[in-house]
Image (tube, rainbow, N blue to C red):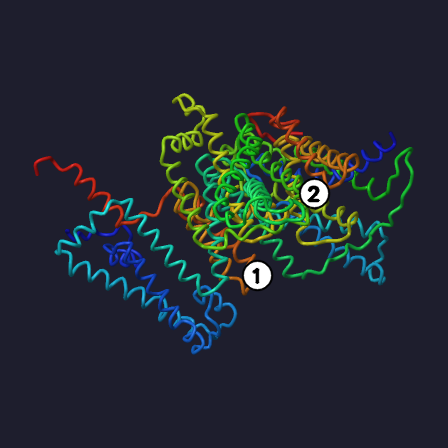
């Protein structure tokens, strides 16, 4: 029983990454009907940005130039990485997706794939093949919470993921930009007629999604410090599966899908051997999709952006 | 034999060049290529050495441009002398011969060879040219054989992504199944292996059993494709993309877990039955022919109808389930065959080589060449492979240049270079038109 509880907790942490990245996929899909296959690689670039920011800030703090505590460094890294990552997303949209607004969705998807490959090779070219290590920003403390052994880092990851999801929901519900995004997901063609700046809202959506991926990047870097340019590929595609599993256009769906996929993967790896993980996990995904073809919270005929 | 000079539909320089060579038959171009290859075989190596290019360049010297920029003048000279001049000389020679002797009775007979025989003759000619060209270098032979495999893969993917309008990424998974099944069959049958025991049949039979093994591999792959085809009845679009993605992961993971297939370590020892260019060439030609017939048949038109509007197609008595099933299974069959060829060309397979990256490569070739176009797929594959080889000296930067090129192509022509079009060979068209006129001529002329 305690094993299950432990694995559940691990799954929450592992799923948080999928959830944060899946949110980016879901949002872009609901307003543009487009899967941004470069999103996983944006996550990877964001992780590297986080690495540089963290190293810089940590260096400044340790050398005394900037009086910052460890926690402050972490918070600053997180915010700065999210901010910078949003620009990466905006750049990708501007370069690759805007010219293809009227093109078939498959062509835009392929373009996204190519942008992803470009980003991977760019990072590899600029930074070389040697692995970079994300600096330790927070001392990892392990403590027992009942039958479950938790670390403060894992708790932080889960809490942050939920908080960001709530903030996103509030943003979409309460702000004008959020309202514009929701309106776009209902009816794309009518939006410019209502005086909404189309390009701005689309750029904002990409920025938001990439910022969340940035947060995921920092948290991932802290949990699994070894960075490599191809880390975004697998996580990106799995987050894509999570977004679909949860249902297109649904914020809760993206998060639920992320946690569900994380849960399936961790549980399968715990019960069976880890080599069977992908096999069984994706068979389960297939099974779920057979019975609920539009995902957990998805609807058949609409992709409207909603909780 | 009138010499009609129809004004070209294309303007500018391309139009003028096209108009110039309008009445050059394909065979003349092939003679030109043959001449170029022969010249290269005769003087290529020495000329390259003289011009300071080192050894005979593998791909027309174009990759050398990226190695040493100061060699560019030499490269231009080399290309012109060895390839362009002999080809043009041969083409003009044939054209002159055609005009000189067009009144002679013998030549008229040439014009009346049935189109099918003409095509077979030209294909054989192409094979001879390729064979001679590849004879100079093992590397060229390898690239040509892998090119054939990629052409088959791209064509089969075009069926599902283009004519059926889905987005499928499982092509690498089908390739993997075909590769492993055919390898197991061939190794079990013809190779003394540690895992599969001594060869069951004499080794000399291997080249004849290979087509059988490929067909069985393709059939098995098609059977596993039911896992993707059946869900496609109910879901479409993005959800089907996920299902194909899941298929890819499942296949990869399954192979890694099956120990007698070598798991992640890989599978070797395949007999060398795909070493000759002829085997791969024949399978490629077969695939192109089958695909062309498929898409121009009623079934192919039904597939396009399902893509355009499934409910409407259903109302027009199209059996959408059958159409989807056949399309997926055909795609899987040919991808499996291509995988089998790949396994025996490279001689070693492991699950890692059949992942998302491979699928992305094939998707790139497909979209570069163009959806819904048989010639587009061939063209896209050739261009992609050539680019990949020519840019090789750039090493890592190659994988920054190629995506950028593809992005530019996507932006300019979102459906691919030859999307929804085919390369129209003017001479074949005029021939077809002439044949039609002859068959429609009033009796008692």
Q: Nearer the viewer, residue B327 or A5?
A: B327
Query: Can residue A201 be seen in the rendering of this structure?
Result: no
At x 43%, y 73%, the residue is B45
Task: Specify the subunit that label 2 lies on.
Answer: B
Q: Report the mark closest to the observer, 2 or 1.
A: 2
- Where disc 1 sits, the SS reads helix
At x 57%, y 42%, the residue is B185
Give how far apart the Cα atoms at labels 2 and 1 are: 38 Å
- Image coords of residue B196 (percent x, y): 64, 44
Find disc 2 in the rendering and name its residue: B259
**Lower sequence index among marks 2 and 1:** 2
Query: Can residue B392 be seen in the rendering of this structure?
Result: yes
Q: Residues within 10 Å of mark 2 (few under 14, many from 20)?
A: few
Quadrant that contains the C terminus of chain B: top left
Q: Is residue B232 above or below residue A276?
A: above
Q: Residues within 10 Å of mark 1 (few under 14, many from 20)?
A: some
Q: Is residue B64 above or below residue B358?
A: below
Find disc 1 in the rendering and name its residue: B397
| Image-based side of A85 in relation to B386, left or right | right
At x 19%, y 53%, the residue is B5
**Picture quarter containing residue A56?**
bottom right
- Image coords of residue B323 (percent x, y): 45, 29
């Amino acid at each position: 029983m305690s094993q299950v509880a432990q694995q559940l907790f691990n799954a929450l942490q592992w799923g948080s990454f999928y959830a944060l990245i899946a949110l980016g996929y879901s949002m872009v899909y609901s307003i543009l009907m487009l899967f941004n296959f470069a999103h996983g690689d944006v996550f990877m670039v964001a992780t590297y940005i986080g690495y540089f920011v963290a190293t810089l800030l940590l260096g400044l703090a340790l050398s005394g130039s900037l009086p910052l505590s460890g926690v402050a460094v972490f918070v600053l890294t997180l915010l700065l990485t999210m901010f910078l990552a949003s620009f990466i997303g905006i750049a990708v949209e501007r370069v690759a997706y805007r010219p293809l607004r009227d093109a078939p969705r498959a062509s835009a998807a392929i373009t996204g794939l190519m942008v992803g490959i470009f980003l991977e090779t760019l990072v590899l070219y600029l930074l070389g093949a040697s692995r970079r290590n994300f600096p330790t920003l927070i001392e990892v403390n392990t403590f027992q919470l009942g039958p479950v052994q938790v670390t403060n880092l894992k708790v932080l990851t889960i809490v942050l993921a939920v908080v960001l999801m709530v903030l996103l929901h509030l943003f979409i519900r309460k702000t004008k930009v959020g309202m514009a995004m929701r309106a776009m997901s209902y009816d794309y063609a009518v939006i410019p007629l209502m005086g909404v700046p189309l390009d701005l809202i689309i750029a904002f959506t990409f920025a938001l999604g990439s910022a969340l991926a940035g947060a995921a990047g920092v948290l991932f870097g802290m949990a699994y410090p070894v960075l490599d340019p191809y880390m975004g590929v697998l996580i990106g595609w799995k987050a894509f599966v999570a977004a679909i599993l949860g249902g297109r256009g649904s914020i809760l769906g993206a998060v639920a899908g992320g946690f569900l996929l994380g849960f399936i993967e961790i549980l399968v790896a715990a019960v069976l051997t880890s080599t069977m993980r992908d096999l069984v996990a994706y068979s389960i995904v297939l099974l779920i999709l057979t019975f609920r073809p539009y995902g957990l919270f998805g609807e058949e005929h609409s992709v409207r952006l909603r909780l | 034999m009138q010499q009609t000079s129809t004004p070209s539909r294309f303007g500018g320089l391309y139009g003028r060049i096209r108009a110039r060579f309008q009445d050059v038959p394909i065979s003349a171009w092939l003679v030109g290529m043959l001449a170029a290859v022969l010249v290269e075989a005769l003087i290529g190596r020495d000329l390259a050495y003289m011009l300071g290019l080192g050894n005979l360049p593998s791909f027309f010297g174009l990759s050398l441009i990226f190695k040493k920029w100061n060699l560019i003048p030499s490269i231009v000279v080399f290309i012109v002398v060895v390839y362009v001049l002999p080809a043009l000389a041969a083409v003009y020679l044939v054209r002159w011969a055609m005009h000189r002797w067009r009144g002679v009775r013998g030549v008229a007979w040439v014009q009346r060879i049935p189109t099918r025989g003409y095509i077979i003759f030209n294909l054989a000619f192409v094979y001879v040219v390729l064979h001679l060209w590849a004879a100079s270098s093992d590397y060229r032979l390898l690239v040509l054989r892998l090119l054939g495999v990629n052409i088959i893969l791209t064509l089969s993917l075009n069926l599902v992504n283009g004519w059926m309008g889905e987005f499928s990424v499982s092509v690498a998974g089908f390739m993997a199944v075909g590769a492993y099944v055919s390898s197991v069959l061939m190794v079990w049958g013809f190779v003394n292996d540690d895992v599969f025991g001594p060869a069951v049949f004499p080794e000399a039979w291997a080249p004849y059993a290979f087509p059988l093994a490929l067909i069985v591999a393709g059939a098995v792959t098609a059977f596993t494709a039911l896992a993707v085809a059946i869900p496609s009845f109910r879901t479409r679009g993005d959800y089907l993309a996920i299902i194909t993605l899941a298929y890819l992961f499942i296949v990869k993971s399954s192979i890694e877990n099956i120990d007698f297939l070598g798991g992640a370590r890989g599978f070797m020892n395949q007999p060398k039955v795909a070493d000759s260019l002829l085997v791969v060439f024949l399978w490629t030609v077969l695939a192109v022919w089958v695909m062309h017939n498929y898409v121009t048949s009623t079934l192919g038109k039904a597939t396009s109808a399902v893509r355009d509007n499934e409910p409407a197609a259903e109302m027009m008595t199209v059996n959408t389930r059958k159409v989807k099933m056949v399309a997926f299974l055909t795609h899987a069959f040919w991808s499996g065959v291509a995988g089998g060829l790949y396994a025996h060309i490279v001689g070693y397979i492991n699950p890692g080589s059949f992942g998302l990256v491979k699928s992305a490569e094939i998707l790139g070739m497909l979209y570069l060449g163009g959806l819904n176009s048989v010639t587009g797929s061939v063209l896209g594959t050739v261009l992609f492979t050539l680019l990949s080889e020519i840019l090789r000296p750039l090493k890592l930067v190659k994988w920054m240049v190629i995506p950028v090129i593809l992005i530019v192509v996507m932006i300019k022509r979102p459906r691919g270079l030859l999307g929804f079009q085919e390369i129209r060979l003017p001479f074949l068209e005029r021939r077809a038109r002439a044949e039609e006129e002859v068959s429609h001529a009033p009796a008692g002329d």
